[in-house]
Amino acid sequence: MSKRYTVLEEAQSYRFEGNEVGVLLIHGFTSTTQSVRPLGEAFAEAGYTVSAPRLEGHGTHYEDMEQTTYHDWVKTVESNLEWLEERCKVIFVAGLSMGGTLALYLAENHPEVKGVITINAAINLPEMARLFEKGESQYIEGIGSDINKPGVTELAYEKTPVASLGELVKLMGKVNASLYEIHCPALVFVSDDDHVVPPENSKAIFESVYSEHKELVHLENSYHVATLDYDVDLITERCLEFLQMYEQPI
């Protein structure tokens, strides 16, 4: 029987009930809801209904994550999408890193998604794929806290299960192959200096989605975890502009 771990403080799912425009906000691989909390609170302060789920296997211990698959992560975000559908007339999806990958998955597979926002989303990480294929160790060092701003720490696992890398690779492949299915408005943020996900990922997303309305925003002062970095105010401002522009029901 596997050991049961408790959820870390600041890693819990959170929700804010607001108006009839909902935002599903998704954290990244090995990370927690702490990494997107500033953005979630800004959305709530602006009056939106927000759901920021803790992905299955995250926010406890990396041994928990090792037992999950990308199907579990998809199930988490789809159940939260349903929660928003019960309360809102219009729904947007947004995510950081793998959270952005999952947001793209939802935009590909759920026509009710009105718009998608990605922040340093991952669709192709050859180095992680190689580490999984080599399978030389069970765990590698953690990838959290790639942040330019001094004194800021991301709540993330100190180790990354190699098996989970394999699940991330599968998810990225599935999402990357169907980007042409996305027709809703898209706002794509990319850090020019990212030590986890190469900026080419966001550029490829921007070029591949079939959205009539799409924009690529460069973040010049932040690393990978841009939602906790110098550009968080810029991200917040541009996200709120995006939501206000497209929030009216069809």
Image (tube, rainbow, N blue to C red):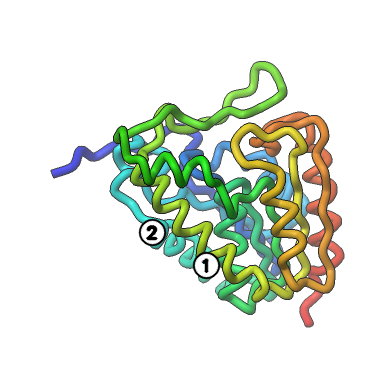
The structure residue drawn at horizontal position 56% and vertical position 64%, both measured from the top left corner, is 175
Query: In the rendered image, which residue does mark 2 sit on?
Result: 72
Q: Residues within 10 Å of mark 1 (few under 14, many from 20)?
A: some
Left/right placement of residue 130 relative to residue 176 reads: left
Q: Quadrant of residue 70?
A: bottom left
Q: Judging from the image, what secondary structure is the residue with disc 1 in?
A: helix
- Position of the N terminus by quadrant: top left
Of the residues tagged 2 and 1, which is closer to the observer? 2
- Give me the disc on residue 60: none
Residue lying furthest bottom = 250
- Position of the C terminus by quadrant: bottom right
Disc 2 to disc 1: CB gap under 8 Å: no
Query: Where in the figure is residue 149, as x and y percent of width and height?
Result: 72, 22
The structure residue drawn at horizontal position 62% and vertical position 52%, both measured from the top left corner, is 95
| Amino acid identity at mark 2 | Asp
Query: In the rendered image, which residue does mark 1 sit on?
Result: 83
Left/right placement of residue 245 relative to residue 105 reads: right
Query: Where in the figure is residue 124, as x and y percent of width and height?
Result: 58, 52
Q: Judging from the image, what secondary structure is the residue with disc 2 in?
A: helix
76 is higher (above) or lower (below) than 196:
below
219 is higher (above) or lower (below) than 119:
above
Query: Where in the figure is residue 65, as x and y percent of width and height?
Result: 35, 44
36 is higher (above) or lower (below) than 77:
above
| Amino acid identity at mark 1 | Trp
The structure residue drawn at horizontal position 61% and vertical position 59%, both measured from the top left corner, is 24
